[in-house]
Amino acid sequence: MLPTRGYAAMQAGSKLEPFTFTRREVGPDDVLITIRYCGICHSDIHQARDEWGGSIFPMVPGHEIVGTVSRVGSAVDRFREGDIVGVGCFVDSCRVCSSCARGLEQYCEEGMILTYNGLDKQGQPTYGGYSTQIVVDQRYVLHIPSGLPLEGTAPLLCAGITTYSPLRQWGVGPGHKLAVVGLGGLGHMAVKLGRAFGAEVTVLSHSEIKRKDAERLGASDFVVISQETSLAHLARRFDCMVDTVSTVHDVDALLELLKVDGTLILVGAPNASLSISPFALILKRRRLVGSLIGGIRETQEMLDFCAAHGITSDVEVIPIHYVNEAYERVVRGDVRFRFVIDLASLEQT
Ligand code: NAP
Ligand code: ZN
Ligand code: ZN
């Protein structure tokens, strides 16, 4: 067993604190990764606070992992010591079901094994990227293309693929009007990727203070949404919307902004039901769809696309001991646009 240091929430909602645990030995197909950077996704907070239910504690969060291969198992043929690699939201799946066969491991019929807050095939809890190292089967490890700044690349492993995948699935491209709802970690990646795919992007945000950032990221329009402001002037404007909002909100009001046959892609995952009026869909043959991260093949495609187009996340790099304050700031919407933990700071504690 490999002794490993990290930061964990010991119970629901408790502050994260230093935590020592063990990783499994490097098996024939495994890669041992020394973690360099790990992004803080809002899903880390939902799970550490058990907002979705069923969380497993102690919990070492983190599924936006970039690091260096420090050892490989005897059968590993895709990676070598010293390679820069990434790990996203899952570290295994059944490998044989119809979803896995299609490269859609995130929709595995047996359930993917989450990078943290999951149980591995031996029934042991999985621990994530707020830690010094991780052992992962090579099938679930990504190549990080050279030339990408590593801290800005870590968030691509979740925020990047979670927006890339549905934008591709629903064919967003030149001539499309795309709205991005919520300018946080996912939202700012949706703006960058939507632009790179050739769409005209509008940001719908709850805070006026993000206007300049939205323009800098490539949005051509910015609209503040609040209970006082009417969105009537945007009715039937968009072909597609990406909804990244992390709390319960008015989806009907957003659906009204879609054209006939428009698509609202829900990626934000509030902890309670959203109400939908049937007529918001029926009257204009609109679609309301969901999307969950992306499979390994598509995640690699996204990384290669981002490298080719010089796309990374806008990040604020923090030492690990700042993580609890960072969580509070994410919940307040006070981050531009992703906190990323420099794991060298854990070595120094
Ligand atoms: P984030 O950085 O906190 O961004 C969420 C944004 O939502 C905020 O920046 C804010 O943008 C808006 N927002 C927050 N509270 C709001 C409120 N009360 N009313 C309206 N808008 C509000 O979070 P994230 O990491 O991007 O994640 C967003 C959501 O996606 C989370 O629920 C997360 O769990 C989920 N997620 C889903 C997947 C998936 O596969 N589907 C993957 C990763 C994350 P403005 O200030 O601009 O309004
Ligand atoms: Zn995430
Ligand atoms: Zn499967």
Image (cartoon, rainbow, N blue to C red):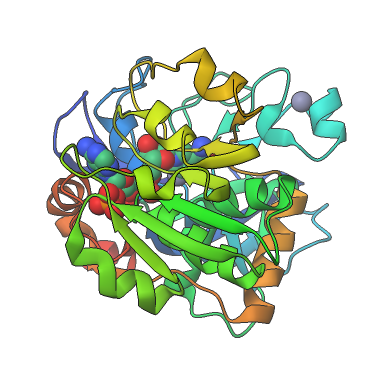
**Would you place residue 32 above or below residue 193 in this image?**
above
Counting labels gives 0
Q: Quadrant of residue 208?
A: bottom left
Ligand 2 shown in quarter: top left
Residue 160: % across, % down? 54, 57
Q: Residue at x 71, y 43 (%)?
A: 295
Residue 173: % across, % down? 70, 62
Point out the image quarter for the C terminus: bottom left
Q: Is residue 120 left or right of residue 129?
A: right
Residue 336: % across, % down? 27, 66
Q: Residue at x 33, y 30 (%)?
A: 47
**Would you place residue 292 above or below residue 140 in this image?**
above
Q: Residue at x 42, y 43 (%)?
A: 244
Residue 56: % across, % down? 36, 21
Q: Please say whether residue 162 is visible from this viewpoint.
A: yes
Q: Quadrant of residue 274?
A: top left
Among all residues in the image, which is located at the extreme bottom? 147
Q: Is residue 315 left or right of residue 133?
A: left
